[in-house]
Amino acid sequence: MNDNITLAFDTSLDKMYIALFSGEDVLESLTVTNHDEKYHSAFLISTIKEVLKNNNLKPQDINLIATNIGPGSFTGIRACTTVARIMAQQLNCKAIGISSLEILSKLAKENSAVALDARKNKAYLYIDNEIKGAIDLDEVKELCNGKNVITDDKLLPLLGGISYQQTGAPLGEILAKLAIERAKTSDCDWRKLKPLYIQPPPMG
């Protein structure tokens, strides 16, 4: 297999997103929801195997692994960054992490702001191509004024704009495209791939 094969996966958000690219062409793109009481990240390994098999590829054919490093579900962030690091190490391939906030910012053409629920009356804010951290909601509302806001179902009534959860957007494809572009100027060493925990995990 001579083409550059990119495998992108994301379990940090409300669903699992997986995309497989050859060069800049999409081979497959999947969205997986939770099953019964099992969180979608439990199906990550089996779904990766299925996607590769569907496309007559082996893990050794992968040149670049891309994953969402957060913010989002602590369980989901931990799952996808761990799998990405282990796969990249075993396959000796490139790996790169992209923030969920940057991924979601691509749902607006321009002048976007991304705000995701961070609990405790805060939101994770991404604005002017920069992660601002976990910000009080009153300040977030002010900073997002006049912007094309991408948010989630919980904050939609407060901030307006669009909820990524209602768009059905192929976030795995967006992740893959961002990673492919970034890989052109980055060494993509798997050792540098770490979860983005803006706030500490909840206790108990």
Image: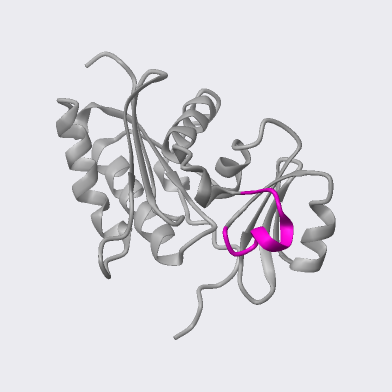
Residue 53 at x, y percent in the picture: 14, 33
As drawn, the residue found furthest toward the bottom would be 204
Q: Is residue 108 left or right of residue 142?
A: left
Residue 44 at x, y percent in the picture: 27, 51
Quadrant into which the C terminus falls: bottom left
Compare residues 27 and 82 and report the one nearer the observer.
27
Quadrant into which the N terminus falls: top left
The question of residue 83 being in magenta is answered with no
Report if residue 20 is visible in the image: yes
Residue 79 at x, y percent in the picture: 35, 58
Give residue 173's quadrant in the image.
top left
Whether 37 is drawn above or below 150: the answer is below
Image: magenta residue range: 153-162
Whether 169 is drawn above or below 122: the answer is above
Report if residue 58 is visible in the image: no
- Report the coloring of the rendering: one colour
Give residue 129's quadrant in the image.
top right
- Please name the residue shown 19% across and 26% down the image: 55
Compare residues 72 and 30 and report the one nearer the observer.
30
Q: Is residue 99 left or right of residue 88?
A: right
- Please name the residue shown 82% across and 54% down the image: 143
Whether 19 is drawn above or below 147: the answer is above
- In this figure, what is the number of numbered marks? 0
- Please name the residue shown 26% across and 60% down the image: 42
The question of residue 158 being in magenta is answered with yes
As drawn, the residue found furthest toward the top would be 2
- Please name the residue shown 17% across and 40% down the image: 50
